[in-house]
Amino acid sequence: DTGVSQDPRHKITKRGQNVTFRCDPISEHNRLYWYRQTLGQGPEFLTYFQNEAQLEKSRLLSDRFSAERPKGSFSTLEIQRTEQGDSAMYLCASSSRGPVPNQYFGAGTRLSVL
Amino acid sequence: AQRVTQPEKLLSVFKGAPVELKCNYSYSGSPELFWYVQYSRQRLQLLLRHISRESIKGFTADLNKGETSFHLKKPFALEEVSAMYYCALRGGTYKYIFGTGTRLKVLA
């Protein structure tokens, strides 16, 4: 296990299409986070899973965004009816149990909506 | 509202000079604060966190609750620490708030 894995690395889509990204966390990590990062900004929190339960969701996550972690292992982030404003880097991070665990980040999926 | 402010987009220092990357936060309770670093073509990674009171690669950061600051310091800059640095806060929930980042450029 070499770390958090995200697939695909790059995605180009047309406005209005649906896209799905996958994140495979470090195997023993039960916590998983999704972030969005646009140019010149820091990562922006989208949602958090502890095992399979989605415990926190940003108000930024509109109805077009949905995330799942069905068996408490990998997670998917789906964006429906993509808009140009969705163009960004989508980052996944995972961490183990503990009061203040270290987040390990994936390399990200860069989405371009044309 | 929880907020993290990094006032400098770019900080250029000469090799051997001291470094201070500024971070101010807004949070009414007791925050957990972190510094993350992203080297060129690499993933974002944790540099240090205030709760551990650790020093990593010569960097230290002290939480000043009075000034609501968590500035990152290094006494002597080396070229290999040129990178993007993000300050982050976690306050009472699972949500991490990141600043906009400061690019540190160490000049030879």
Image: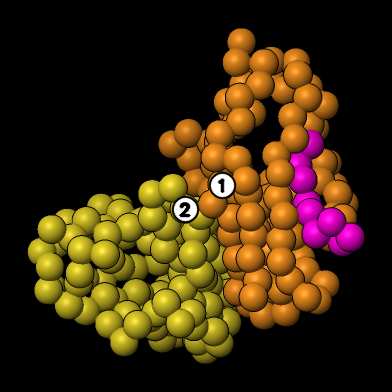
At 51% from the left and 69% from the top, the residue drawn is A45
Q: Amino acid at mark 1?
A: Gly
Give x and y (percent) for residue B91. Answer: 71, 74
At 61% from the left and 31% from the top, the residue drawn is B11
Q: Amino acid at mark 2?
A: Gln
**Which corner quadrant of the image does residue A77 belong to?**
bottom left
Q: Can the viewer see residue A102?
A: no
Q: Residues within 10 Å of mark 2 (few under 14, many from 20)?
A: few
If the image is split into quadrants, where does the C terminus of chain A sit? Answer: bottom left
Chain B visual colour: orange
Mark pair 2, 1: CA separation: 7 Å
Say whether residue B69 is magenta. yes
Give x and y (percent) for residue A102. Answer: 67, 60
**Which corner quadrant of the image does residue B12 belong to?**
top right
Read off the magenta span.
Answer: B65-73
The one of B93 and B3 positioned closer to us in this rendering: B3
Secondary structure of the residue carrying numbered label 1? loop
Is residue B103 placed above or below B33 in the rendered structure? above
Secondary structure of the residue carrying numbered label 2? loop
Chain of the residue under the numbered disc 2 shown in the image: A
The one of B73 and B27 positioned closer to us in this rendering: B27
Q: Given contact means CB atoms under 8 Å apart, are the residues at marks 2 and 1 in contact? A: yes
Chain A visual colour: yellow
| Residue that carries the numbered disc 2 in the rendered image | A41
* Labelled disc at residue B101: 1
